[in-house]
Amino acid sequence: MSCSLRIIVSGVIAQYPLGGMTWHYLQYALGLARLGHDVYYVEDTGAWPYDPARGDVFDDCTSSVRYLADVMARYGLADRWAYRFGARDEWFGMSGPTRKALFRSAELLVNVSGYLTRLDDYRRIPRLAYVDTDPVFNQIKLVNGNERFRGLVDAHDVHFSFGERLSEHTPATGHHWRPTRQPIVLSEWRPAAPRRDVFTTILNWSASNNPPVYRGRTYGQKDVEFDCFLDLPRHVAPTVLELAVQPGKRRQAPLDLLRAHGWRVVDPETVCVDLDSYRAYIESSKGEWSVAKNGYVQGQPGWFSERSACYLAAGRPVVVQDTGIAPVLPVGVGIVPFTSPAEAVAAVRDVERDYPRHATAARAIAEAYFDSDRVLTRLIDEATSAAAAQARPANGWANPPAAAT
């Protein structure tokens, strides 16, 4: 699309002022701006902000607003953001008249992860796009009778999903889920940065108090999958595996047990809490090793982590649990999926054996498949043109040739 659109991106940078969350949403706004669109960031969830120092939400948004303002100013969006503090129904950022004029004149709203819920206030915008970043779990929520959530999703005009190949393992919801993936602003990631000889990941141990059940099967979090790989460090030694692990909401991460089995464990709120330290942590890694949520493993939706995409952009190969990605992304070099402990061991050893080849392929995959110019141009075309959606290939993406192998 050659014409410039006035676009609102919605996320939770202030609500969760953490490095990974910031990059996740920022790269939508920054990538669209670099394409020449007239971009604004609006955060209107009504939820109380999370304080990394306390490890909990609290009723003071001062530090969160300051964090958001600093991020937006740093990337040329100083006068293009608004945040509503739900506890007092108070807005920050753009003035009231400017904000209301924006809501009247915007042509597209991109609701990443669906955190913006008061959609009646935004209905003057001609197109509302929902980006599902948690496939399988969201589809189960829709069919299991969560009417409030269904009302939210139904209120959008077009629906995208990080589940690039939703299949019979994922319940049909009555929506046309168009495949999409994390946009990466490649210039922000530096393959030449110095690295340690350590494979890392940034891990939320368990993000749910009540794992969903669908047709008698429970769809769990990463903790369920990790149990199968507890002994991995001793099988890949002397390779070092490091976890920046969040404790989790439902099941606390067993830090002592992990250390006893050879995992190096660090605190993410110390080593990668904000925008810069998160990027530096990824760039300081030799590569990523990570499990996926149990729901993604069972559902095989073709989901790929926005965090892993950042590793690729930094030229760091990723060894990740398979979620059905092979039909939509090149695998084997740069991205090495595994389904069992034996395959995980073989994958780590293969990357170690020919690291320059894997590192070169990692960045090449990021350039060919995750470049924000490419990802966001497609998203905007599909969000604004029914013809573009109807013309998409059967697998959802007209992928370029496989990255260098």
Image: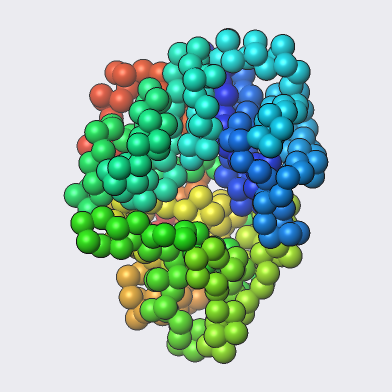
| Front residue of 4 and 122 | 122
Q: Is residue 237 above or below residue 293?
A: below
Position of the C terminus, as image quadrant, is: bottom left
Q: Residue furthest front?
A: 88
Q: Which residue is depicted at the point 62% across and 23% down?
A: 39
x, y percent for residue 224: 40, 71
Left or right of 242 in this view: 277: right
Q: Quadrant of residue 155?
A: top left
The answer to whether residue 325 is visible is no
Q: Which residue is depicted at the point 67% across and 17% down?
A: 99
Q: Which residue is depicted at the point 53% across and 19% down?
A: 122
The answer to whether residue 219 is visible is yes
| Front residue of 289 and 66 | 66
Left or right of 12 in this view: 169: left
x, y percent for residue 145: 30, 42
Q: Is residue 28 above or below residue 106?
A: below
x, y percent for residue 59: 73, 45
Q: Which residue is depicted at the point 21% across and 56% down?
A: 215
Q: How did the renderer colour the structure? A: rainbow
Q: In this view, does 111 lie above or below 12?
A: above
